[in-house]
Amino acid sequence: MTELRNESVKIFIEQDYEKKALLRENFLKELIPPYLSRYSSILEKNVEVGEWLVGSSVTWADLFIAYSFEFLESSLGQSVLEGFPRLEEHKARVYRIPQIKAWIEARPDSLY
């Protein structure tokens, strides 16, 4: 996921609007799908054990992935999980954890 986030930075620092649009399009159509497929596959393989990336309970991996998807979506202004319902549900499941849900409802507005 770190590699994907690093690639997204190129979009935000590009000053030329035409190049920025091309980078964004490439990011959404070429770079993201393999990562999403990989994470979706991990969830699918773990379905017999639980609904999380590793084992039968939430881990830091689940929190990191859910937040990373939120960060990308808020930065790009659109969903990146379309076509990956297992990942959409995973992110929603993480954000339904009572302590996380309470924090999200109370946290101050921020770009980050």
Image: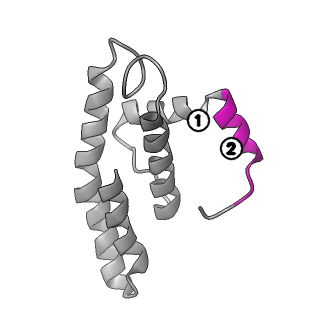
In this view of the protein, can residue 90 be seen by the observer?
yes
Q: Is residue 83 left or right of residue 30?
A: right
**In x, y percent, where is residue 98?**
68, 28
Of residue 20 and residue 56, the one placed in the foreground of this image is 56
| Count of labels in the image | 2
Where residue 44 sits, quadrant-wise, is top left
Name the amino acid type tagged 2.
Ile
Magenta span includes 104: yes
Magenta span includes 42: no
Of residue 43 and residue 99, the one placed in the foreground of this image is 99
Q: Considering only vertical position in the picture, is 17 above or below 57?
A: below
**Residue at the image point whose x is 36% and y is 88% from the top:** 16
Q: Considering only vertical position in the picture, is 88 above or below 27?
A: above
Of residue 16 and residue 57, the one placed in the foreground of this image is 57
Residue picked out by circle 1: 95
Disc marking residue 10: none
Name the amino acid type tagged 1.
Tyr
Q: Secondary structure at mark 2?
A: helix
In this view of the protein, can residue 88 be seen by the observer?
no
State the predominant SS element of the stretch in magenta: helix
Query: Is the residue marked by circle 1 packed among few (<14), some (14-19), or many (20+) residues within 10 Å?
Result: some
**In x, y percent, where is residue 74?**
53, 58
Contact (Cβ within 8 Å) of mark 2 with mark 1: yes
Q: CA distance from mark 2 to mark 1?
A: 8 Å
**Residue at the image point whose x is 38% and y is 44% from the top:** 82
Residue picked out by circle 2: 104
**Residue at the image point whose x is 47% and y is 36% from the top:** 60
Residues rendered magenta in the picture? 98-109
Q: Secondary structure at mark 1?
A: helix
Query: Is the residue marked by circle 2 packed among few (<14), some (14-19), or many (20+) residues within 10 Å?
Result: few
**In x, y percent, where is residue 18?**
33, 83
